[in-house]
């Protein structure tokens, strides 16, 4: 396939009958668009969500073969329970859920909320599920990774001061570094699983609107209706990264100007997001913080 094609859509997905896809945060936004496309392609879709009620509502709309399971990425016990209750193969794990630009907060384990949820939560989940995964791990990053930095002496911003944007950028940079090191470890272990990353471009979702003034959220939603991609369109990079024959650690985003809109293609990343030394150290630090290690020898 020509990976630079500007016309790849969900209609080009392969048949996924009998294959299980786990998607975190699948009840809304890009995760919902991703789950809908996978279900239409015949996959058994697992909506891993914090709110079972909202998950069930989404599942009824998505249709197809599905199930809803509770997962709170800001709670290590929830992650452990989700993984330990799992039986059978997982063809594709999509690390989609996340929080964005929220006021300073802590996860149940005491980590800064954005880094703890977006990176450490998915780090622990992926490693706990990895013995079940047979094909692909796709982790959602963002163009915001380019403003992110990793300061191993100040991961929770206790010294430098918290800022919602810089904390989000750090968490998304961590997502790309995680993908880079996960792919290296998978190759070293002789695994058939590949790690890739994606970003959706600009999508009209609820991400980043929590605790914002109602008038500001209204403006965002109005702009979204005029300018943003639909969740289905925004899901295309993830679907592409999950199913196409791409090199490990590939990063997929929209092909339009500024990577805000368009069809999936391989996109670039910051120099720090390509730093294998930083990626390896982040992995080691993440193992120490979560108590979860790479499970494959």
Image (cartoon, grey):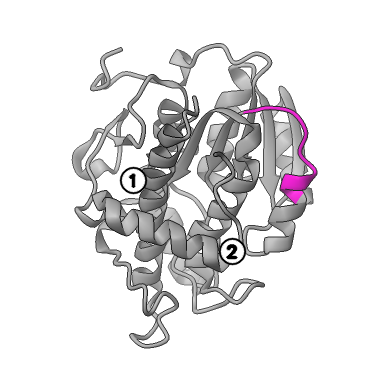
Distance from disc 2 to disc 1, alpha carbons, whole Å, reads 39 Å
Residue 174 place in picture, x, y as percent: 39, 57
Q: Quadrant of the C terminus?
A: top right
**Residue most extreme to the front:** 297
Position above or below: 162 against 30: below
Q: What element carries label 2?
A: helix
Report the side of 96 relative to 147 (left or right).
right
**Does residue 99 appear anywhere in the picture?**
no
Tag of residue 81: none
Report the side of 6 relative to 79 (left or right).
left
Residue 51 is drawn in which quadrant? bottom right
Q: Which residue is drawn at 25% across and 57% down?
A: 146
Residue 244 place in picture, x, y as percent: 40, 20
Mark 2 or mark 1: whose residue is earlier in sequence: 1
Q: Over which residues does the magenta segment extend?
A: 82-90
Tag of residue 227: 1
Residue 220 place in picture, x, y as percent: 41, 59
Position above or below: 51 against 48: below
Residue 73 place in picture, x, y as percent: 63, 58
Position above or below: 24 against 14: below
Looking at the picture, tell me which residue is in the foreground, 128 or 190: 190
Q: In which quarter of the image is the N terminus?
A: top left
Tag of residue 290: 2
């Amino acid at each position: 396939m020509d990976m630079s094609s500007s016309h790849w859509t969900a209609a080009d997905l392969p048949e996924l009958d009998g294959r299980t896809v786990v998607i975190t945060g699948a009840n809304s936004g890009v995760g919902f668009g991703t789950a809908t496309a996978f279900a239409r392609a015949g996959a058994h879709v697992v909506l891993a969500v914090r709110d079972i009620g909202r998950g069930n509502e989404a599942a009824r709309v998505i249709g197809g073969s599905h199930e809803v399971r509770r997962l709170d990425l800001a709670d290590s016990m929830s992650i452990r329970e989700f993984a330990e209750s799992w039986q059978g193969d997982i063809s594709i794990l999509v690390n989609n859920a996340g929080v964005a630009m929220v006021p300073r907060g802590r996860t149940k384990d005491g980590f800064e909320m954005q880094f703890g949820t977006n990176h450490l939560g998915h780090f622990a989940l992926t490693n706990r599920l990895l013995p079940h995964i047979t094909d692909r791990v796709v982790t959602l990053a963002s163009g915001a990774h380019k403003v992110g930095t990793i300061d191993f002496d100040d991961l929770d911003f206790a010294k430098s001061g918290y800022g919602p944007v810089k904390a989000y950028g750090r968490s998304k940079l961590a997502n790309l570094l995680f993908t880079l090191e996960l792919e290296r470890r998978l190759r070293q272990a002789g695994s058939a699983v590949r790690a890739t990353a994606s970003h959706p471009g600009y999508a009209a979702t609820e991400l980043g609107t929590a605790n914002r003034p109602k008038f500001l959220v209204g403006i965002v939603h109005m702009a979204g209706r005029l300018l943003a991609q639909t969740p289905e369109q925004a899901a295309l990079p993830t679907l592409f990264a999950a199913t196409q024959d791409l090199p490990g650690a590939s990063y997929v985003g929209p092909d339009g100007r500024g990577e805000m809109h368009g069809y999936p293609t391989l996109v670039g990343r910051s120099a720090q997001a390509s730093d294998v030394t930083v990626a390896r150290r982040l992995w080691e630090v993440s193992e120490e913080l979560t108590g979860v290690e790479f499970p494959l020898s």
